[in-house]
Image (cartoon, rainbow, N blue to C red):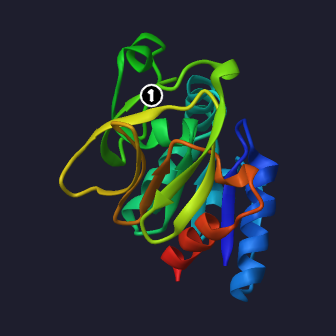
Amino acid sequence: MKIAVIAAQGDVEEHVVAANKALRKLGIEGKAFATIDKEEVAESDAIILPGGESTTISKLIHKSSVAEEIKKAAREGKPVMGTCAGSILLAKHGDEEVRKTKTKLLELMDIWVKRNAFGRQRESFQIRLDIKGIGEFEAVFIRAPAILKVSSNVDVLAKLDDYVVACQQDNILALSFHPELTDDTRIHEYFIKMAK
């Protein structure tokens, strides 16, 4: 199994390490690797879109034509996971900030997102979440977005206050937090199982 971690910006290496550890734990042959090469993305079985700065990531993936490969892979049923800024890019609907920065969304999920919903960098925090299909998980939020609203075809996996912070629509997974910043690989395992 090949897992492409989109190397535009953000926690790329952390996702590569977490996904490779998850593959080993599940006893699955394969590897996760960092790339922004559209051919490598096209040949992968699953795609991770890490956090970082959503406007920058958007520009880089569209400039390199990787955005089209991610959309194509999603349409083919390959699992795609977006964490933090990655979850913003998966959305069909962005808030005022998304519009103001002219961030081009991939429009793969019927969700409405709000950038920096939990405050700036200094307001970062860690909290235990109860995630459907996973259980208790120590989630790291850094300048995190939130999902304000989801359509009926989107499965809510976790909430924090009134915000949705984890959800799934078919083969696409959006998380407001950073699972790659913990030693817990269960979310990456869950994601990999989606590809099996």
The residue drawn where x is 74% and y is 54% is 182
> Could you tell me residue 21's position as x and y percent?
78, 72
Q: Amino acid at mark 1?
A: Lys
The residue drawn where x is 77% and y is 61% is 183
The residue drawn where x is 18% and y is 54% is 152
Q: Residues within 10 Å of mark 1 (few under 14, many from 20)?
A: many
Question: Looking at the image, is 88 positioned above or below residue 13?
Answer: above
Question: Looking at the image, is 99 positioned above or below residue 76?
Answer: above
The residue drawn where x is 57% and y is 39% is 84
Q: Secondary structure at mark 1?
A: loop
* Residue for badge 1: 104
Question: Looking at the image, is 30 positioned above or below residue 13?
Answer: below
Quarter where residue 165 is shown: top left
Image label count = 1
> Could you tell me residue 35's position as x and y percent?
74, 52
Whether residue 141 is visible, yes or no, is no
Whether residue 85 is visible, yes or no, is yes
